[in-house]
Image (spheres, rainbow, N blue to C red):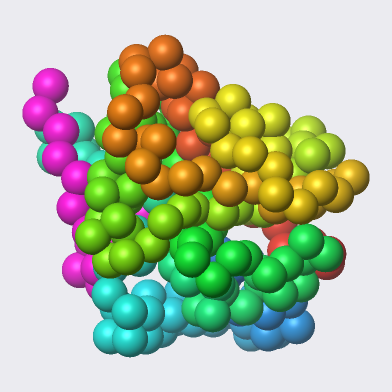
Amino acid sequence: MGRRLVPLTLDNLQDLPKRCRTCVFWELDPVSGEAAVRAGTPALEKEAWISAVLLDWGSCGRVVYVDEVPVGFVLYAPPAYVPRSTAFPTSPVSSDAVQLMTGFIMPGYQGQGLGRVMVQTVAKDLLRRGFKAIEAFGDARWKESACVLPADHLTAVGFKTVRPHPTYPRLRLELRTTLSWKEDVELALDRLLGAVQKEPALRPL
């Protein structure tokens, strides 16, 4: 099985699942996001966001390929580039951290350690860029697939709650810990990144 992870760019954006290419839950604030959906322009907004972040900050995602087939991705950026993050009651993300926005592994490829490799690749990238941690908003009442990852899945792979909330706690993962992960976290990571599978709905916070 040949697998490779490459930075997300405008050239390989089409390799993301269609529902993710046209989702701007994190990339726009709630009002702008709903307006983009009504106007039928979320795909254009997504492309514009990625282009702007690439120019201003650099790589903001990874795409994983197995035998040249795109099977998953992860998206991350400093909170200043993630307008939706300010709508959460447990914001803001810490100044020394990057926000894990969302991620996905196709169901047929879960359980193969791809989640671990993907997150470790992100950790190495961010450590080189001077960041200490990844933070994420979790959904403590998660029942179905959506853009906000389930809080219990985040804690299962090592995230620690830094600001509790009954619905949307903010969690943190120290980057250096990801570089020494054992194989026993692979299943938990695949469950975490496999949690976003259906068409995400823009929902008010």
Q: Quadrant of residue 50?
A: bottom left
Percent of width and height locating residue 145: 66, 40
In the displayed structure image, the side of residue 60 where residue 11 appears, left or right:
left
Q: Is residue 9 magenta?
A: yes
The quadrant the N terminus occupies is top left
Q: Looking at the image, which residue is at 52% across and 29% down?
A: 157
Task: Magenta stretch: give its range.
Answer: 1-18
Q: Is residue 114 magenta?
A: no
Q: Quadrant of residue 153?
A: top right
In the displayed structure image, the side of residue 76 where residue 39 appears, left or right:
right
Percent of width and height locating residue 35: 70, 84
Q: Nearer the viewer, residue 53 or 71?
A: 53
Q: Looking at the image, which residue is at 47% across and 28% down?
A: 189
In the displayed structure image, the side of residue 9 where residue 49 appears, left or right:
right
Q: Looking at the image, which residue is at 59% across and 65% down?
A: 94
In the rendered image, the vertical position of residue 45 relative to residue 111, given as above or below: below
Percent of width and height locating residue 2: 10, 28
Q: Nearer the viewer, residue 14 or 147?
A: 147
Camera sees residue 75: no
Percent of width and height locating residue 125: 26, 56
